Image: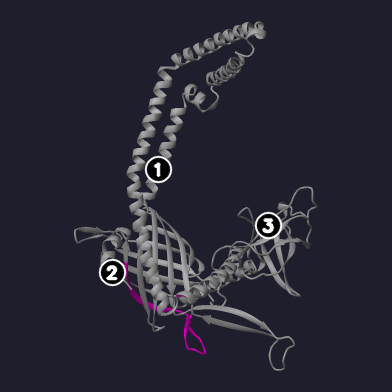
Amino acid sequence: MKKLVTPFRVGLLVLAAGGVLFFFLTFVKKGGMSKEESVLLNASFRDASGLTRRSRVQIAGIPVGEITDIKLEGVRARVYLRVKREIGVRQNASISKRSESLLGDYMLDLTPGTEEAKVLDDGGEITKVVDAQGMEQIFGSLTTITADIQAVTGALRNVLGGAQGQGSLESIVQNLVKLTEAVERTIRESAVKLDSILANVDAVSGDVRRLTEREQNSVGNIVGNIEGISKDVRDVMASVKKVIGENEGDVKGSVAGLKDTLAKLDRTMANIEDVTNKVKQGEGAIGALVSDQKLGQKVSDTVEDIADYAGKLTNLEVEVGVKADYALNQGNSKTFLEIRLTPKPDKYYLLEAVDDPRGSVSTTYVQSNPPTSGNPVTQKQTITTQSIKFSAQFAKRYSFLTLRFGIIESTGGIGADFTLPIKFFYSSRWIEDAFAVKVDAFNFSIEALRFPRLRATVRFIPFEHVYVHVGVDDILNTPNRDSLSNQYVSGRDFFFGAGVYFTDSDLKSILPVVPKP
């Protein structure tokens, strides 16, 4: 009997599991909303890539519906969606496609419209459709920027390529070192003079402040006395004019010059009275200096601003480095010239010139007009060119994590550095951040690549000014070689390399012993 009970139980378990699976599949196929609680709408999209059945429809980040079907109408995609009836989608509603992540998944953002518009019934169409959102717009802009940068890098390669270009780069580096040294020397020499000037200005502002506070009553008395004197002089001048006027017939010839002098003196006294009144009322620079007690504080604030700006100039650190990588599948080396500008310990600006053996890959379309027999009207051409690539990144550090963004090898990209909290003692100094893991993602808009170019690097600093590293480049794409030149243009590749770096103080010490080209 026990032998029959066990198989019977197993059979019941299988039947129960099959029933649960059938119910679940039926529920999934049916969808999450019934016809009574939702309304069926549709919209026409130019591009429905990334949208699938059961994709979310949301308002302000809250799901309110889902896509039920997608059909092709001519050259456009008709998307059918169910939205909760309680939302009340209006005739002036709008809908847009938005990327959920960098993996290619999309959702629909719905704006239900305003209350004065009529509510859409079952089968209604949303006419306001926005196709491109988020990363698609960014990629479109980056494509234009990349084309401009490639044109610039092509011109620079013509100038800097070959042995002559290498000599020019060495000359540029030496000139940059000399310029850095000259700037630092100028700042250092000017710092003493600037400190002296600031100290003098501070002292003068303090003296003026103390003078105006202590002698304010005395200045007022002086201005009052000058006004009294000018009034008395005017009375005397009026009396003299009267006497001379009464005896003008007798002394006309002898006192003509005296009258002119008195007229000039009268005008001078009027000017003095006008000036004293303006000083008393606080007009003009002298009036403000005498009457405004906040002038000293303003002068002191100006001095502090100048001192802060001078401090930022003296704290800027410049680092120059050169590194080379050897790619195993490529069978060739890749070189970098790096310049790092560090205004603060937690941020820096990175500039790079990169000689990449993979070159730059671009896609062009050629249209035959009139078309020839046996050939398509439009032909696609992929062109690989050798050119120097450039990087310009801004980096911000948060504890052990450093985030970077900008231009990476002539295309838009982002990166992150994970610094391990390990340091060791070498040559009487502690070397910090000896171990680091670097991740870069770029080439988002290159049509020849299926996925963006993802690179991971592990760096180790064995001693000061020298580091070694290993890593994997283009992790996501499969290997691909050019059919004509057999050149490795894309795909996963392992590399290893080393580099050296020097700060501005290091360059000043080694510059005298470097041979001239």
> Which tag is nearer the camera, tag 3 or tag 1?
1
For residue 21, side relative to residue 38 (left or right): left
- In the picture of the structure, the residue carrying the numbered disc 3 is 110
Location of mark 1 (residue): 308
Residue sitting at x 31%, y 60%: 433
Quadrant of res 17: bottom right
Secondary structure category for the residue under label 1: helix
Q: Is residue 495 magenta?
A: yes
User: How busy is the neighbourhood of tag 2: few (under 14 within 10 Å), some, or many (20 plus)?
Assistant: few
Please state which of residues 9 and 258 is positioned toward the viewer in this rendering.
258
Residue 512 versus residue 6 in the image, above or below = above
Q: Is 516 placed left or right of 492 in the picture? A: left
Question: Residue, x 37% and y 53% (percent of image)?
Answer: 316
Picture residue at 69% right of the left edge, 59% below the top: 95
The residue stretch that appears in magenta? 474-500
Tag 2 residue: 514
> How far apart are the alpha carbons under marks 3 and 2?
66 Å
The kind of residue tagged 3 is Leu
> Can residue 346 be seen in the rendering of this structure?
no
Q: Amino acid at mark 2?
A: Val
Q: Earlier in the sequence, mark 3 or mark 1?
A: 3
Residue nearest the viewer, comparing 121 with 284: 284
Q: Is the residue marked by circle 1 packed among few (<14), some (14-19), or many (20+) residues within 10 Å? A: few
Whether residue 202 is visible here, answered yes or no, is yes
How far apart in space, not on screen, are marks 3 and 1 (Cα)? 50 Å
User: Which quarter of the image is occupied by the N terminus?
Assistant: bottom left
Image quarter of the C terminus: bottom left
